[in-house]
Image: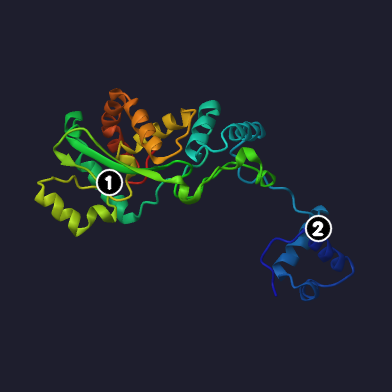
């Protein structure tokens, strides 16, 4: 069977060995199973340069230097439980280099919808955006979220106490937070099934709630998404962790009240930049 991969130095040496023993290229191909063209090229190079091994190739330049790798490792060691986005931000701020970031997969259909949606609102002013009632929901639990908690560690550190997460059955309970902000004119909600159901649409019609059309796969267009990050940072900064649902709810309310109005204002004012970012990205995910 003819092999398609590149031959190892040992295999190339075997070809040269048969050649030196007087075998023809056809005979060498039959004995080794290597392609005739491969056999010919190996022998031709050997006759011309005397080389048997393959010269090293430069390949794609490495994104990170050895120093960058050591620095990234130090950052991860200090922030074992931080999400990928924060690790990336810390690394970028300290080195100026970038690493890959995960973003929602935007289908071609939704890409076009996102692009058209942004173009239609390109001339909106800040006052227009202030007339939107922004909404979103997030779940907070006492000990862990509803999925796996990931930490940055080596394989040998699997049972190291520094990288274990304390757990309780059923996560110790949780509180679902629903938030809406700013204005009373158009109500924004994402396209989760619970929001697009017939019952929800009927309720909005009965209550006279005007909905803002919303493109799918577009968390980068909802400024409230960043409020959850702000709330989580404030919760992480607290020394005492909640022991029951009552304490968890109190902690959430306390941290939420600490967020200044300037934060809300800046997020709403970011909408024009978000719109331009979507247009520039042709509807694909943006940095927001």
Q: Residue at x 39, y 40 (%)?
A: 245
Q: Relative to 62, is 241 on the left or the right?
A: left
Quarter in which the N terminus is drawn: bottom right
Residue 135: x %, y % from top left: 26, 41
Residue toward you, 189 or 97: 189
Residue 154: x %, y % from top left: 66, 43
Q: Relative to 17, is 250 on the left or the right?
A: left
Residue toward you, 174 or 4: 174
Label 1: which residue? 115
Q: Is residue 73 above or below residue 30?
A: above
Label 2: which residue? 46
Tell me if label 1 and label 2 are in contact, CB under 8 Å.
no
The disc, 1 or 2, on the residue closer to the chain's N-terminal end is 2
Residue 259: x %, y % from top left: 33, 26
Q: Residue at x 44, y 49 (%)?
A: 146
Q: Relative to 163, is 13 on the left or the right?
A: right
Residue toward you, 186 or 20: 186
Quarter in which the C terminus is drawn: top left
> Can the viewer see residue 288 in this picture?
no
SS for dot 1: helix
> Can the viewer see residue 262 in this picture?
yes
Q: Is residue 183 above or below residue 46?
A: above
SS for dot 2: helix
């Amino acid at each position: 069977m003819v092999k398609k991969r590149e031959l190892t130095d040992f295999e190339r040496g075997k070809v040269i060995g048969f050649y030196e023993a007087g075998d023809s290229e056809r005979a060498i191909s039959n004995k080794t199973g290597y392609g005739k063209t491969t056999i010919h090229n190996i022998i031709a190079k050997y006759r011309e340069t005397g080389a048997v091994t393959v010269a090293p190739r430069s390949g794609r330049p490495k994104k990170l230097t050895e120093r960058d790798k050591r620095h990234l490792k130090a950052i991860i060691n200090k922030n074992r439980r931080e999400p990928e986005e924060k690790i990336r931000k810390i690394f970028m701020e300290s080195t100026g280099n970038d690493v890959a970031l995960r973003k929602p997969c935007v289908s071609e259909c939704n890409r076009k919808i996102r692009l058209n949606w942004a173009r239609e609102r390109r001339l909106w002013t800040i006052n227009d955006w202030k007339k939107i009632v922004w909404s979103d929901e997030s779940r907070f639990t006492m000990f862990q979220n509803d999925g796996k908690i990931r930490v940055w560690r080596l394989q040998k550190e699997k049972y190291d106490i520094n990288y274990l997460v304390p757990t309780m059955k059923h996560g110790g309970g949780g509180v679902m937070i629903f938030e809406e902000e700013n204005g009373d004119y158009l109500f924004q909600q994402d396209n989760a099934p619970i929001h697009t159901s017939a019952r929800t649409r009927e309720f909005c019609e009965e209550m006279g709630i005007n909905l803002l059309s919303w493109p799918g796969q577009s968390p980068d267009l909802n400024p409230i998404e960043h409020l959850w990050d702000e709330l989580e940072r404030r919760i992480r900064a607290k020394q005492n962790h909640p022991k029951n649902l009552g304490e968890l709810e109190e902690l959430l309310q306390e941290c939420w009240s600490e967020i200044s109005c300037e934060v809300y204002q800046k997020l709403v004012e970011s909408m024009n930049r978000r719109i331009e970012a979507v247009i520039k990205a042709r509807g694909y995910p943006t940095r927001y």
